[in-house]
Amino acid sequence: MRWRDGNQFRLLRSGTEYFPALLAAIDRAGQEIFLESYLYEPDATGRQVSARLMQAARRGVRVNLLLDGFGARDLPAGLRTSLIKAGVRLVFFRPEHRVFALERQRLRRMHRKIAVIDNRIAFVGGINILDDVDEPGLPPRYDYAVQIAGPLVPDVRQIAEGQWRYTCWTQLRHEWARHQRPVPDPTTPGSVRAALVRRDNLRHRRAIETAYINAINQAHDEILIANAYFLPGISLRRALLAAAQRGVRITILLQGRIDHALLHYATRVLYRPALQAGIHIHEYTAGFMHAKVAVIDGEWLTVGSSNIDPFSLLTAREANVVATDRQLAQALRDDICAHIARDAVQVPPHSVRSSRWWQRLMPWLAYQLVRGLLGLTGYGRREYRE
């Protein structure tokens, strides 16, 4: 990680705050836009973002839109055509050609959610381009992103352009793959020390996991994690249990509603050892949770796209920001704690100890299935061997 001092950060809570900030930045773009997203839906939000991107392209802004070939595979042909006709350079990372093919590389998705505008402002987080409400009557999807200005922005731009050029080269779009000279970056005074951490299948295979483990190993007082999909491997689990043994207060907020059933039930295998170690587990039940954040000792924090599960930690391209700033960390901590108090239920330790064998069967079977799938693909067998 390359730490950068002097950044300005703004915490964005769910799409309610993220999309107005993103659209305003797109409207101010003068030379270039990089936008990456795993999901990109043709709903009201997707159409609004598309309209602003097309407006930017028409006024001469170089707009690079990179979407995942699996997550955004159903983007309608009409919207694709409109974007391209307006001048938006649309590319899909690893486009799906055979729906039922059993190929290992199909798991290597582009799961990042990044935007960089004019090398001046960047957004990193877990929010896809889609409407913020999953079902009528539910609150907005619980998620986070950060808006960044300052010395870290060129680092975000560098990985965005690198992924863009790589994808264009693999699809023989050589004209689009040419190096794009970055826009001069005006100095923006700030106080946040931060670094960008990415996970890929080359030199950064375990970078995000290592960042978590290092921070957990250095924790003295409190670890607060809010993560929608939580199935860590042995190394990260051991770090959490060791922290609990040395007296660190650990609270984990997880998804309470069933979103992805396999991970939902497999995660519950970890409840018993965690609760026995004194770790507090809460389940978010007010709506759907998509957050991937953590705060440690009221100073270290991370916000990004990476879940703590095999998909994010072993196969997908991810991007997280880590920062050390008490004011920013406190704002994130306060918001997580407010959701825990208002929108979540705590898992009592006795509920796991007293559960019947058939109540433990489904989580055990789900976990064994995850292990089996990892074994078949060759990913993470050591981390999920027990």
Image: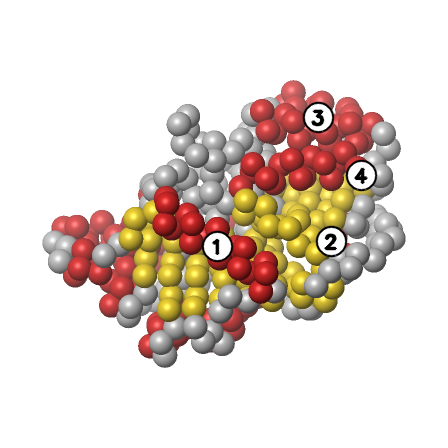
Residue 130 location, quadrant:
top right
Residue 63: assigned label: none
The local secondary structure at tag 2 comes to: strand
Residue 51: assigned label: 3
Q: In this view, does 366 lie to the left or right of 299?
A: left
Mark closest to the chain's N terminus, 1 or 4 = 4
- Against 243, residue 129 (above or below) is above
Mark closest to the chain's N terminus, 3 or 1 = 3
**Residue at the extreme bottom of the image, as rendered:** 246
Residue 253 in the image: x percent, y percent?
38, 54
Mark closest to the chain's N terminus, 3 or 2 = 3
Amino acid type of the residue tagged 2 in the rendering = Ala
Name the residue: 50% across, 62% down.
295
Name the residue: 62% across, 36% down.
19
Disc 1 designates what residue?
Answer: 334
Disc 2 designates what residue?
Answer: 149
Badge nearest the viewer, 1 or 4: 1
Q: In which quarter of the image is the N terminus?
A: bottom right
Name the residue: 79% across, 50% down.
119
The local secondary structure at tag 4 comes to: loop
